[in-house]
């Protein structure tokens, strides 16, 4: 049964990686929309390259911040 358990763990980690990749792409597109609307409300008309760059930086920061363990900052020991 050890081989089947290992195969199941491999398949579940591959599925989790694909789902996280899809969520990252969706969050990037949502961030592009938010940056475009925010720039329009502020009266700016940035080029597409600046919108894509700022959305990429914001989405990357959000993904990294969401994946880091924050329990070390709160002082709670598990």
Image: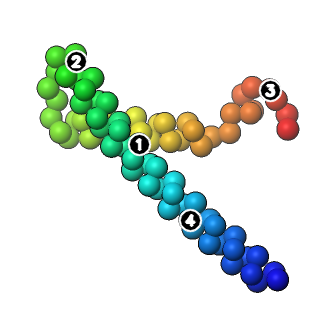
Name which quarter of the figure residue 4 lies in.
bottom right
What secondary structure is marked by label 2? helix
Residue with the mark numbered 1: 27
Name the element at disc 3: loop
Query: Which image quadrant: the C terminus?
Result: top right
Residue at the disc numbered 4 = 15
What is the distance, in whole Å, between disc 2 and disc 4 at their CAs? 39 Å
Element carrying mark 1: helix
Pick whichever of labels 3 and 4 is earlier in the sequence: 4
Judge from the rendering whether residue 3 lies leftward or rightward of residue 35; answer left or right. Answer: right
Residue drawn at 39 percent across, 47 percent down: 26
Disc with the residue nearer the chain's start (2 vs 4): 4
Residue linked to disc 2:
41
Q: Can residue 57 be seen in this view?
A: no
Q: Name the residue under label 3.
A: 75
Question: Judging from the image, what secondary structure is the residue with disc 4 in?
Answer: helix
Distance in Å between CA atoms under marks 1 and 4: 18 Å
x%, y% of residue 48? 18, 39
Residue 5 versus residue 77 in the image, above or below: below
Residue displayed at 50% across by 62% down: 18
Report how far apart the C-alphas of labels 1 and 2 lie in the structure: 21 Å
State left or right for residue 5 relative to residue 67: right
Q: Answer yes or no: do the residues labelled 1 and 3 have beta carbons within 8 Å? A: no
Name the side, left or right, on which 14 lies relative to 56. right
Look at 51% across and 54% down and name the residue there. 20
Quarter occupied by residue 29: top left
Classify 10 Å Cα crowding around label 3: few (below 14), some (14-19), many (20 and above).
Answer: few
């Amino acid at each position: 049964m050890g081989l089947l358990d290992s195969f199941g763990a491999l398949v579940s980690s591959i599925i989790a990686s694909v789902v996280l990749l899809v969520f990252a792409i969706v969050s990037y597109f949502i961030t592009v929309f938010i940056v475009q609307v925010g720039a329009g409300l502020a009266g700016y008309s940035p080029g597409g390259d600046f919108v894509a760059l700022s959305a990429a930086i914001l989405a990357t920061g959000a993904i990294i911040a969401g994946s880091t363990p924050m329990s070390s900052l709160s002082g709670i020991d598990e």
